[in-house]
Amino acid sequence: MKERFNVKVKMWFAVCSLFMLMSLASVAYSQTVSLTSAEKYWLTYMREEEKVARDVYIVLYDQWQSRIFKNISLSEQTHMDAIKTLLDKYGIADPAAGKEIGEFANPDLKDMYDELIEAGSVSLVDALEVGVEIEEADIADLNVGIASATRKDIITVYSNLLAGSLKHLDAFNSNLARQ
């Protein structure tokens, strides 16, 4: 009986050790994979650019109460989350961490946010045009990000975000046509 117990203990020890090694290898892999400088740049830039879109849409929804801004702001949060997953995987600091609405690490994106809020505050039509502008910029930047990426997971995330931004652009254009 004692011998069977010792065999089971040894087997559990071996299995647990194997799982621990696999976990450590997984963590080490995600931290040792080196991205190109372009990949790092675009991941951090796109994280904040998606935040610009989300933040602008939240503010414009509060001002105009147009459902499109609320719906797409939720989608932009999903975009931010997808990029955050990649930042975490590759051990890159999150530039949006702890930032409130309208706060950005990148001063160019802060300026963009301020300009978009100002333009979108004039009228609902202007706000919808801001939505078009944001999505067109996002589409252009995602295409550059895709072209500069070498990692399949990054290309996949950007491609999915691109498809979402194209839908957002169509939605803003449809809403503009009705105005």
Image: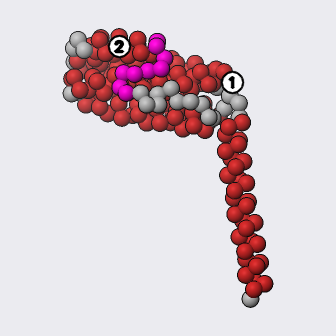
| Residue occupied by mark 2 | 114
Q: Residue at x 71, y 53 (%)?
A: 22
Foreground of the two, 70 or 45: 45
Which of these two is toward me, 46 or 136?
46
- Magenta segment includes 101: yes
Write down the region rendered in magenta: 100-108
Tag 1: residue type?
A: Thr
Instruction: Report the residue at 62% width, 34% height from top.
Output: 91
Residue 44: image quadrant is top right
Q: Residues within 10 Å of mark 1 (few under 14, many from 20)?
A: few
Q: What residue type is disc 2 on? A: Asp
Q: Is residue 144 left or right of residue 47?
A: right
Name the residue beneath numbered marker 1. Answer: 36
Callout 2 secondary element: helix
Residue in the foreground of this view, choosing between 37 and 5 = 5
Q: Is residue 139 left or right of residue 119?
A: right
Quadrant location of residue 7? bottom right
At a point 62% along the width and 25% down the height, the residue shown is 40
- Residue 23 in view of the camera: yes
In the rendered view of the protein, which quadrant contains the N terminus? bottom right
- Secondary structure character of the magenta stretch overall: loop
- CA–CA distance in space, label 1 to label 2: 31 Å
Residue furthest out toward the bottom:
1
Percent position of residue 67, x then y: 25, 31
| Horizontal side, residue 64 vs residue 165: left or right | left
Residue 100 at x, y percent in the picture: 37, 27
Vertical side of 106 occupied by 159: above or below = below
Q: Quadrant of the C terminus?
A: top left
Residue 118 magenta: no
Identify the residue at image location x=73%, y=77%.
8
Percent position of residue 23, x then y: 67, 52
